[in-house]
Image (tube, rainbow, N blue to C red):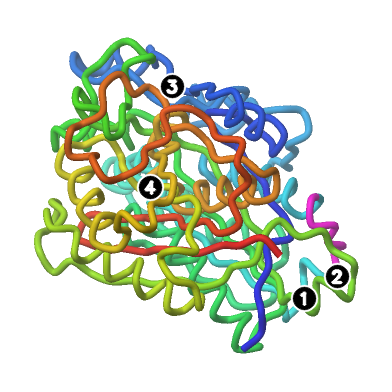
Amino acid sequence: MNRVVVTGLGFISSIGNDRAAVLESLREGRSGIELMPELAAMNDRVKLAGTVKGFHFPTTDPLDWSFPKNVEFSRTQLRTMIPNAVYSVAAMEEAISDARLDSTLVSSPETGLYCASAGSAWLTHLAIESVLTRGPARTSAPTVVTGMPNSLHLNLTARFAIKGASVAFNSACASSSHALGSACDLIRLGRQKIMFVVGAEDCHPYNILPFASLRALSSQSDPALAPRPFDVSRDGFVITGGSAVLVLEDADHAAARGASIYAEVKGWGQSSDGYDVVAPDPTGKGLARAMNLALKDSGFTAANVDYINAHATATIAGDLAELNALKTLFTNDCRPQVSSTKALTGHGLSLAGALEAGICCLALKEGFMPTNGKVGKLDPSCEGVSILAARSDVAPQVAMSNSSGFGGANVALVFSTI
């Protein structure tokens, strides 16, 4: 099969709106979590979010929206946009520039796009309300498009004139990891030369508050105390929004055009817990299977893995399940360094897999391993797992990124240096 490499990255995130800013935040252990006034005003329990700076969506009218000057839209384009599509256009443009792709390569039958998003709950609510109160005849087509769960996919394929394969994925918090693994397979099989992989979410109370109802979110009001993956005092996750884009490319194609390479996508694995609608299998056996399949696909063994970007969201059940999975695969003879960068970024839901895969690529390219962050006292269950309480400047050669979602969906991705 063809080899697959990562040749471009783009970020709009709580810890920075481009690759350089994200890299600096990771090196410094800088968190993007802060108090979100509009969220606090709508409920008395959840107040923190991984806010996206420089983007503002004060009303449902796109003409009231503001974003950095380098992000441009026509009035026609804005009519069908949702916030996470705005983030994604900016991240896509950075990734395209970073990979040095010209317009003929972007809009080629050999270039596709796989994306993941839960849609925009805010604008879906508006669309349904309009149909019910004003009637179908008085509800505009753009309003309906903004309410669709695949609105991100519709907007990106049109904006960038994508001619190759394109699919919108939805498997909860494993969504963009599923997108990346599936995109990798398309290139391996020779069906595409380049694939854009996009993960994105809004950062809006309508996307956040349902998880508060599930008692999954932290109730802390101090950003320094949440989220705290693997900490004994963790009390839930903090949601973030934004977009992360990776350019996956056939290795020979990348070499022929002299592209710079971040990392090679060596393999991936997926599994299902078959356990519960929301709760993970406490034994971690499902995630352990996904990691084991990823290693087999990559040709590596557990002893080859230097760093793992854990899914760990800072829920008690989720972190413990992942710890059990890690202990199943990695014994005393091979203990990779582990961190959950959600302590810094927040949990991006459908965005999480792509964001953390991009972070793994930065770690491999730049030669460091990012901190877990905010750990005061490790949960005793972490014994036997090497949690990074501080950044490590030891350069990893092989990195794994884990993702798990409601319904027991698990994905593990393996990257290596070239």
Where is residue 332? Give x, y as percent.
31, 54
| Cα separation between marks 3 and 2 | 39 Å
Q: First in sequence: mark 3 or mark 1?
A: 3
Q: Which amino acid lies under the numbered mark 1 shown in the image of this protein?
A: Ser
The disc placed on residue 310 is 4
Magenta range: 98-104
Where is residue 64? Give x, y as percent.
59, 25
Assign a secondary structure to mark 2: helix
- Answer yes or no: do the residues labelled 4 and 1 have beta carbons within 8 Å? no
What residue is pinned by disc 3?
33
Residue 134 seen in render: no
Assign a secondary structure to mark 4: loop
- Answer yes or no: do the residues labelled 2 and 1 have beta carbons within 8 Å? yes
Q: Residues within 10 Å of mark 2 (few under 14, many from 20)?
A: few
Q: First in sequence: mark 4 or mark 3?
A: 3
Q: Residues within 10 Å of mark 1 (few under 14, many from 20)?
A: some
Residue positioned 79% across, 57% down in the render: 99
Q: Residues within 10 Å of mark 4 (few under 14, many from 20)?
A: many
- Answer yes or no: do the residues labelled 3 and 2 have beta carbons within 8 Å? no
Q: Could you tell whether 12 is left or right of 249 in the image?
A: left
